[in-house]
Structures are given as structure tokens and as C-alpha cells.
Amino acid sequence: MDVNQEKLKTELLTVNMGPQHPATHGVLRVEIKTDSEIVAEAIPHIGYLHRCKEKHSESLDYRGVIPYVDRMDYLAAMNMELGYCLTIEKMLGTEVPKRATYIRMVCAELQRIASHLMFFGTYAIDLGAFSPFLYAFQKREEILRLFEEFSGARLLYNYIWIGGVWNDITDKHIERILKFCDELSEELKKYDTLVSQNRIFIERTANVGLISQTLCYEYGLTGPLLRGSGIKWDLRKNRPYCFYDKMEFEIPVGLGEKGTLGDCYDRYSVRMREMIESIKIIRQCLQGIEAGPVMGKVAKVLKVPAGEIYFRTECPRGELGYHLISDGSKKPYRLKVKSSCFTHVSVLPELAPGQMIADLVATIGSIDIVLGEVDR
Amino acid sequence: MSSQHNHATVSHELSLGQYFDNIKTAVITTFKGMMITLKYVYGVRPVTIEYPEVKEELPEISRSRLYNDAENCISCLQCASACPVDCIYISANRRATDAPALKTKDGTAIKLDLTMYTIDTALCCYCGLCTTVCPTSCLTHTTDYEYASYTVDQMKYDYLAPEVRAWRTRIVKD
């Protein structure tokens, strides 16, 4: 044992990062023990946004749960609704009209783009660049405007219903979505020059917050985190739902292009490339869309047959699973939500030790958590 | 808890040439980004609006302030039971048999006298479930979004009160 080193050891300083911290995207408190600038330990404390969603849904009818489901991941409400409705429909055995399924997929993919744009903007802010945020929000606003015209709300839509979707979309909307896709493809090239190729951004993210493949498996990480570490796993491809099996798209995986495989840059680049794939899916959906009803036959008083189901979908932040137990009544007996963000927060204590505080901010940003989904 | 695999320590020393090379690429790539920003100085239409002077026209379908047209309401309580946050309070009395027969706009007979129809807008989550179940479509989401108030009590709208009913001409589009 080196005695001198032991003597030189200084006392660790405990600092609370959060609950109100711009880098935590919500109310996450990370208790960090620092040795000067180096983080020795980081413990995430959650629960500030806990709204008893799971318990509360036991006292609501199946349709009334949807507005609450929206409020879990408020940046990807469409995907949350889609997962929930697919779960209930699978239990009911409802057949969803083709047009409705296509509209759902378009909405889910648009929402994925909106969510990733939000990530892009806020991640740049975390790392000290402000203007990309404004570019990203300009595009995101167009998506929100479209959703507002579909559903009437900008963030918490209650648009995807059990059996279909609330309103039909018009041909004008389809034209606008296609125009938006063209514009976004151009815009993404701009983002590439603006941020992805920026030397300062690369230096801040490459080789930072490495997640090895073993760590991915150990913690059960999903979504862009898993793909950023080079594991090709996407539920849309591997366990297709809706019409994703008919679609042609790639699963972007981290390549370790600027640093090591599984670093912050890889997770960033996976999300940026995912947007391109989403555009592809939207284009294919709008080609395949056909006239018809948007709402299937669902009983007015919804009673789900007794039983149990676990259904998962791919959300912008990872896998979202619903575990529903029904006793055959009008209300769910138990609705457990498996959230990817919760899993992703749990990996933070593994990533933090040895990092600079500024790098910890970059790591939390690259994990891209929404606390509404963590706490539910 | 091993953390060796988490951070690749950059152990090699930078040479002077590499040091300046890094600075050079940083300046060049930042400059490229700045050129994109520079393009926005002229020729790009502003996307923001100056709110109190310029007001945004919301889509017709937009879900804002709730309005119940009490004259067409048949007190069926469907909105109250559909509401996930239970913010709609309704009470009604049976209409006297000798009272003149009333009908809604679409011809449904009104058999109950509405004595209270109050919505606590502060609780409302604007999900729109109540408007979709309304059989006479008297309960609607309007596109009026300017209704901030100083106290929570003011958010409780009594749709039978004359001052609240006076909104109708302003916010409901027939």
C-alpha cells in the first residue's frame, strides 16, 4: 500500500445536482460525491414527479387511462398511447382498421422525430451550444402544429384510442407531412455541420460515458443506449407490431466513429440517424395509406376479458412495456408500466465514477431521460 | 462495482503540433456552423410571433376552455362519468309534469331541470373525453385560450351563471 497516497487523500465533498438543474431534464436529484472536479460516486434520487399513475389507473375506466398515459413521457405521448392501446386491443381482440394503423404509425414516427429533435437541442445546450436548440425547436414546432390539427392538443394528445384513432387526417395533412419530411432531410444535414462535425462537440462527447455491451445486458438497457453500444436490437424490427414488418428501414447502431464504441457520441449519432429512418417509415406509410374508417368496433362500455398480458413497444427512449392484469371489469385490476427511463437512470452510478462533473452532465444528457416516465 | 470500463483515460501527451491542430479544426468547424447561422440573418422568415399584439389562430379542433351550452344540456351525466379527473359537477331535478315541454337544438326532449353545472377548470386535464360522449354536443372545447385568473376559485365556472353564459357569443362557433 502506498502510504503517501493514502495521506494525500482528501475528504469527499457531497454536492446535490438537482432537483432543479438544467441538465437533468426534469426533477432528478443526483447526489454526487466529488474529489475536486472528479466524481467519485453518483446516486440518483427519483420520485419528485411521482403521480401514482399506476395506482390511479385502477380507479379509472380503460378509456380514462389514456390521458394519464400521455403524461408519463410528455415528450413522446403518441408512443405512450400507442403502446397502451395495442395492449388493450390485444386483450380485446379488436381489429384496427388499416387506415388507423397507418395513421398511428405516422404519428408515432413523427413523435419519435420530435422527441429526438428535443434531445438534439437540449443536448447541445448541456454542452454549451445554444443555437442548435432554436433550430431543433423550429422543426419540432411544425410537428406539434400538425398534431394539434389532428388531435386538438400540442403535447398530451389523447389521439390514439382503443380501436383506432380519434380523428381522420386529410390529404392536405399528408401533403404537409411529406413536405415536412423533405425539409427535415435537408435540415438534418445542417445539424450535421452545425453540431455533429464540430470539433468541440466531438471532444466533449467522444470517449465519455462509455457503456460496454456487458453493462447493457446487466442493466437491461434498451433503445438508443443499447444500439449506441453496437447491439442491433429494435422491437420494430425484432418483434414487429402494427405494420412495421412491412416497412423497409435500417436499425442504426453505434460505430464508435469518433471514439470508443458506446460513448456519448455514439448514442447521439444513433438518434440522429434514427430520424432519417423514421422519415423513411413515414414516407412508406403515406404511400400505403388507403381510404377507410379510422375507428374499429369497440363496445361503448369497455370490459376487458379477465387475464394477463405484457406488451412492449419501441419508444424514442427505449422499450415501453405494459403489464395489464384484468379481472373482467370496467377498470384495470393492475397496470404496471415498465419504463425504459427508469432502467436508464439506474445505470448512472456505474457511469459516473472517475468522470469530471461536466462530463457527467454530458452523460446524463446522452441517456436522455424524461422524469415523468421514470417516476410515473 | 468496477468502473474501469467506464472511462478511457487519455494518457498520451499531446505534441505541440497536435495541440495547434486541434485548435485549428475547432475553429474551422465552429466557423462552418457559424456560416449556417449567418445565413439566417437575412432572407429567413421569422417563425416567432409577438404574442399580445399578434394572436395565433388555433385550429378549429383545438382543445381549450370548455363551454357548456346549458340550454341544450339534457343532464345525462355522461360527461361527468367520462371525466378522468372528476371535475364536472352536475345536479338536476325532475321537471314538473305540467311545465312546458322543452327541447334541445337537435330535438331531444329535456326531462330534467339543470340546477348546477360547474366545471373546475383548474382540475381539468383537457383530454376531450367529456366532449366526445356528449349526446347533444352542447359541451364543447372552444379555441379560447386567454383565461388566466388570479385565484383558483375563479377557475370554477358555473355555466348557469349569466356572466359565464355571456361568453357564448364570444367563444362558441356554431
Image (cartoon, coloured by chain):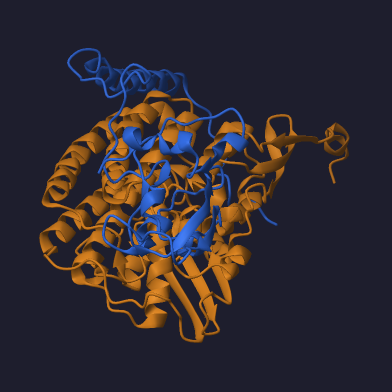
Res. B60 visible in picture: yes
Q: Which corner quadrant holds the C terminus of chain A?
A: bottom right
Query: Of residues B171 and A74, which is closer to you in this image?
Result: B171
Res. B10 visible in picture: no
Left or right: where A287 falls relative to A355: left
Tell me the quarter of the picture where residue A240 sits: bottom left
Q: Position of residue A52 (x, y in %)?
A: 63, 59
Query: Of residues B69 and A328, which is closer to you in this image?
Result: B69
Is A90 located above or below residue A9 in the figure? below
The chain coloured orange in the image? A
Q: Position of residue A185 (x, y in %)?
A: 20, 41
Is B34 located above or below residue A258 in the figure? above
Query: Of residues B99 and A330, which is closer to you in this image?
Result: B99
What residue do we see at 62% from left, 50% from top? A348
What residue do we see at 57% from left, 48% from top? A371
Left or right: where B149 falls relative to B73: right
The chain coloured blue in the image? B
Query: Of residues B30 and B82, which is closer to you in this image?
Result: B82
**Count of numbered badges drawn on the protein:** 0
Q: Position of residue A46 (x, y in %)?
A: 67, 50
Left or right: where A252 falls relative to A33: left
Q: Residue furthest top?
A: B42
Q: Residue furthest bottom?
A: A306
What residue do we see at 45% from left, 67% from top? B97
Left or right: where B138 falls relative to A219: left
Is B46 located above or below residue A16 in the figure? above
Tell me the quarter of the picture where residue A104 sits: bottom left
Q: Position of residue A195 (x, y in %)?
A: 35, 31
